[in-house]
Image (tube, coloured by chain):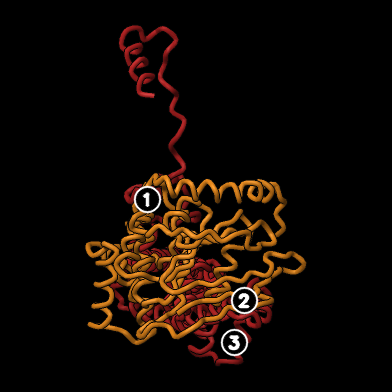
């Protein structure tokens, strides 16, 4: 299933946040969206998943979601959004219960996604016992459990420290290599963008518009920490963004 | 960094006096820990003090009854078999009244927390009835619900209701919105979100609200038994009070205190059981 953004514009009252954004998100690819703070990256992600409505333009699903997809558009949040009163397995089970999947059927799915995210030993732990990286792996497991067509990732690694971030990036690359998934990955971290993105969309500062779309052809599994190719891409992206970021930083915040 | 540590430790070993001194500790505190026996000791000290004072005549018998006399009166009450008659009736009034008040209060609180119209319509109403001394309405309840148990249930229920509503909608407001967004993003039904996310998330606030409203229910128990009650702890206290029988008055008061401690302990146990997930 592909996603197409068709001429999306949005403003809050008189405050224009994004202007005429059109973008294709092809199946099986990770599309990273980068941009200075306040350019509407996260808002755009909420439009794609239907948590908010744009004033103009449409978000289109092209083609049917894969067979057995319980929740085609599935988010992974920056702050994990785990229920603190449920165990790791309980948090995954939460999103299955509403689809009537319980008991043995649920257990099969839960065991499978926990194994894929290396959490099998922690099934009964409560979120408060887990580190940030583990919490985000639980959130990824929960997202995998509903067999999404597109994963919408809102700065998923931003709340983690640098080392954990590297580890989780490796995990995400592993997951993708074993079974390619479609994802929209919003981040302000260019290293993440060049490591995980097949396509990096650079937004300008507010009102957010597409500055440029950078394609990175190197296969995900061949990309490594400190890769010279990736550094080149990252430098290029930073050049595109630096002045925008500086100007955005100096802006007054309108709330 | 490590170099600096080495050199200071060497310095400290050789000549401690040469303007090197330990950094003054100024952290700590602001983290009270429970010491169960201290609370118990406070009670014991107060009772021993009262006993000693009344025995030596330092406190006159009119000012404060002697604790041992209060205990004797209590044992008399126990022997007469009336204790459980009083206690049983009062407990049933407390349980029925508080159960009605708390359950209606929690439901209305959740409605206010979730729906704009309920919020706009009911918050001012609750604010208007909160400060009314519920005792003042006892005659009204007697007319509405009769002089029997009905008016007593109603008074206790009404008194428990308002603080529960306020605590509940505050607790619902404080449920992490990102968890609700998460539920929506996974396509959970409205009812699932309320049951699995909103209610458990509001539970800490609801329980701490219940602590207050159940204490109020015990206070109102005495008021409820002012009219048309022959038996009950409240009736017992009021009768003793009108006769200035301080020993019996204190027996009743101590029973109410113990009831309060018991209720608080029960809520504490529920909290430990339900809220183990809190950090």
On the same chain, marks 2 and 3? The answer is: no
Q: Residue A119: in sight, yes or no?
A: yes
Which residue corresponds to the image point at 35% horizontal and 11% vertical from the top-left? B11
Q: Earlier in the sequence, mark 1 or mark 2?
A: 2
Q: Chain A in the picture: what colour?
A: orange
> Chain under label 3?
B
> Where B144 falls versus A28 (above or below)?
below
Specify whether A8 is left or right of B41: right
Instruction: Give percent across and percent down for residue A167.
Output: 34, 52
- Subunit that carries the residue with mark 2: A
Chain coloured red in this rendering: B
Residue holding disc 1? A166
Q: Which residue is mark 2?
A: A6
Residue B140 screen position, x and y as percent: 63, 86
The residue indicated by pointer 3 is: B141
Give me the residue at 35% from left, 15% from top.
B7
Q: Quadrant of the N terminus of chain A?
A: bottom left
Q: Secondary structure at mark 1?
A: helix
Q: Residues within 10 Å of mark 2 (few under 14, many from 20)?
A: some
The vertical placement of B170 against B225, above or below, is: above
Furthest-right residue in this view: A14
Please indicate whether residue A116 sits to the left or right of residue A29 in the image. left
- Pointer 1 local density, CA inside 10 Å: few below 14, some 14–19, many at least 20: some
Q: Are marks 1 and 2 on the same chain?
A: yes
Foreground disc of the pair 1, 2: 2
Tell me what residue is drawn at x 36 percent, y 61 percent: A172
Viewer-proximal residue among B221 and B173: B173
Q: Secondary structure at mark 2?
A: strand
Which x, y percent locates residue B196?
Answer: 42, 77
- Measure how far apart labels 3 and 1 are at the Cα level: 68 Å
Q: For mark 3, give the secondary structure.
A: helix
């Amino acid at each position: 299933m592909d996603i197409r953004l068709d001429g999306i514009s949005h403003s809050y009252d008189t405050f224009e946040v994004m202007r005429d954004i059109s973008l294709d998100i092809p199946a099986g690819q990770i599309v990273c969206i980068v941009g200075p703070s306040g350019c509407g990256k996260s808002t755009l992600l909420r439009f794609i998943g239907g948590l908010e409505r744009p004033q103009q333009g449409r978000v289109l699903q092209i083609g049917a979601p894969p067979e057995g997809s319980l929740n085609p558009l599935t988010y992974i949040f920056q702050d994990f959004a785990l229920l603190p009163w449920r165990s790791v397995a309980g948090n995954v089970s939460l999103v299955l219960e509403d689809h009537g999947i319980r008991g043995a059927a649920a257990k099969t799915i839960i065991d499978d996604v926990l194994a894929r995210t290396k959490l099998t030993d922690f099934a009964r732990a409560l979120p408060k016992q887990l580190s940030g990286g583990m919490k985000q792996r639980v959130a990824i497991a929960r997202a995998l459990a509903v067999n999404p067509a597109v994963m919408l990732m809102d700065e998923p690694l931003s709340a983690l420290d640098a080392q954990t971030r590297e580890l989780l990036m490796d995990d995400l690359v592993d997951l993708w290599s074993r079974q390619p998934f479609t994802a929209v990955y919003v981040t302000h971290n260019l290293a993440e963008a060049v490591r995980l993105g097949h396509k990096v969309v650079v937004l300008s500062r507010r009102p957010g518009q597409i500055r440029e779309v950078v394609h990175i052809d190197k296969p995900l599994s061949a990309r490594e920490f400190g890769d010279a190719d990736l550094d080149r891409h990252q430098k290029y992206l930073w050049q595109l963004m630096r002045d925008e970021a500086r100007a955005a930083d100096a802006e007054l915040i309108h709330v | 960094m490590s170099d600096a540590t080495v050199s200071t430790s060497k310095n400290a070993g050789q000549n401690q006096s040469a303007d090197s001194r330990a950094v003054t500790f100024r952290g700590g505190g602001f983290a009270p820990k429970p010491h169960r026996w201290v609370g118990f000791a406070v009670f014991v000290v107060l009772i021993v003090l009262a006993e000693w004072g009344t025995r030596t005549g330092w406190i006159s018998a009119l000012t404060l009854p002697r604790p041992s006399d209060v205990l004797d009166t209590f044992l008399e009450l126990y022997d007469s078999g009336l204790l459980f008659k009083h206690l049983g009736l009062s407990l049933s009034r407390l349980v029925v009244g508080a159960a009605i008040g708390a359950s209606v209060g929690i439901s209305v609180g959740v409605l206010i927390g979730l729906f704009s119209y309920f919020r706009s319509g009911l918050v001012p109403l609750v604010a208007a009835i909160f400060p009314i001394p519920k005792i003042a309405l006892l005659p009204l309840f007697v007319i509405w619900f009769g002089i029997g148990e009905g008016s007593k249930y109603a008074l206790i229920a009404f008194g428990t209701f308002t603080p529960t509503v306020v605590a509940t909608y505050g607790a619902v407001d404080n449920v992490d919105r990102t968890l609700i967004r998460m539920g929506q993003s996974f396509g959970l039904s409205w009812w699932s979100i309320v049951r699995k996310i909103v209610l458990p998330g509001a539970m800490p606030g609801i329980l701490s609200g219940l602590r207050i409203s159940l204490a109020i229910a015990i206070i109102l128990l005495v008021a409820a038994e002012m009219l048309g009650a022959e038996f009950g702890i409240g009736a017992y206290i009021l009768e003793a009070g009108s006769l200035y029988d301080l020993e019996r008055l204190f027996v009743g008061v101590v029973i109410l205190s113990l009831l309060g401690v018991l209720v608080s302990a029960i809520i504490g146990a529920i909290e430990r059981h339900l809220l183990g997930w809190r950090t």
